[in-house]
Image (tube, rainbow, N blue to C red):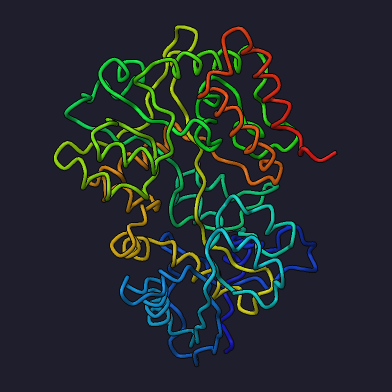
Amino acid sequence: MKKKILALLLACCMLVGLSACGGSDSDQPANTDQTPSAGGQTPAPDTDAEPEKVALTVWTPSEDQNPDLGAWVVTMCDKFNEEHPEWDITFEYGVCTESDAKKLVPQDVDKAADVFLMGSTGLENLCQANALTEWGGSYRQAVEENFPSALVDTLIYDGGLYGVPITTNTYFMYYDKSVFSDEDVKSLDAMLEKGTVAYPLNDGYYLAAFYLANGCNFFGPKGNQREAGIDLSGDKAVAVTNTLVDLVANPNFIAAAPSDAIAMMREGNCNAYVCGTWQAAQTEEILGENYGVAMLPSVRINGVDTQIRPFTSSKAVGVKSSTAYPEAALNLALYLAGYESQKYHYETRGYVPCENKLISEVQSDPVCRIDSATVSQIAVPRGSFTEMSFFWTPAESMGNELRDGAVTHENAAEKTEAFHAAANTSGVS
């Protein structure tokens, strides 16, 4: 199909600038000739022209294709086709989880899906394989204007943007309102005076939040400075370790994974615990009218109430670098992450929205309200650098030693420095 030629001024202003991540100018797919709008929509097409035949393969988890769960991706792709008469799209679907995309797509980029769901923590794997199209010009502007900056940051690699977020991945606190007041849940120290709180101390994903609270960081403040490494050093980190020593000595503080904590809550032995969105329905069923959701509280470090800060990452939609139809693929990706699509994903799968307009419309849902507040106010973007893998085993060991009393005030400095060193080395000689 021959597209209408846009006015020269518009063409100069768009500066779309799409390229393959890590690729040279010769790797760039053809520039598109339409500018996306806020919700992933494009301007009205030339209805007099014959539709261009397009074939797109889309990979998602199987649940997103299941008719019993609303067949989210099939439903939205069909709607996209209906709303874009400039294209006659044939869709093919394949199964691939967000976490598996970083392994499967690089195996053969050309045979991978044109559009696929991915986890932001696998971004470096995908970019090192030159597997993703970079979002430039008006496409990048559309993402930056319509999604929280903390989530956009999780999809930036070496300054380039390589996807559009469809939901968040962070954590917060579930609690029993009959035990804790709205004021109590602002302070972990206050909560421990009234009831029991479970925290997954030997899981680095959660343990990191205490160190992030007091100025430690992972590859810089936004997680995008490889040379900064993982900073768990000095007095700021030792102060956190000493605080954790005091916490585990408190009988009301329970070191427990979310799956164990919810079981204890069901038995009446736990009044609050930390987790993400995935246990919300079960927790509400247990607590009933006393169901409470709150951001992570503050904790007293060196006598100062200090906000605990969780990681955030995102699940996102990516477009492969070698797609034969970059314009259609990019606009489909924006559409799958847009208002209507995220709304349907929320209604059918419980995916917490992260599109700005929709966020404001779901604030009556406590999980959505607290999740979005966490991301926008206190969460720290988790970087995608592969060196992050060095952290998990030392963090598990540190958490276990804290829980078991092997870390004390007397050896806190020594243990913290060893933790810092181990978190910055692969462990392979």
Relative to 149, say whether 299 is above or below.
above
- Quadrant for the N terminus in the image: bottom right
Number of numbered tags placed on the structure image: 0
Specify the quadrant of the image occupied by residue 255. top left
Specify the quadrant of the image occupied by residue 193. top left
Q: Residue at x 46, y 13 (%)?
A: 246
Q: Residue at x 69, y 19 (%)?
A: 417
Residue 26 vs residue 50, the one in the foreground? 26
Which residue is outermost to the right? 429
Which residue is outermost to the left? 289
- Image position, residue 429 (x, y; %): 85, 38
Q: Residue at x 54, y 13 (%)?
A: 242
- Image position, residue 104 (x, y; %): 65, 67
- Image position, residue 377 (x, y; %): 42, 33
Relative to 17, say whether 251 is above or below.
above
Relative to 176, say whether 329 is above or below.
below
Residue 219 vs residue 427, the one in the foreground? 427
Specify the quadrant of the image occupied by residue 400. top right
131 with respect to 368 (left or right): right
397 with respect to 179 (left or right): right
- Image position, residue 315 (x, y; %): 50, 55
Residue 176 vs residue 346, the one in the foreground? 176
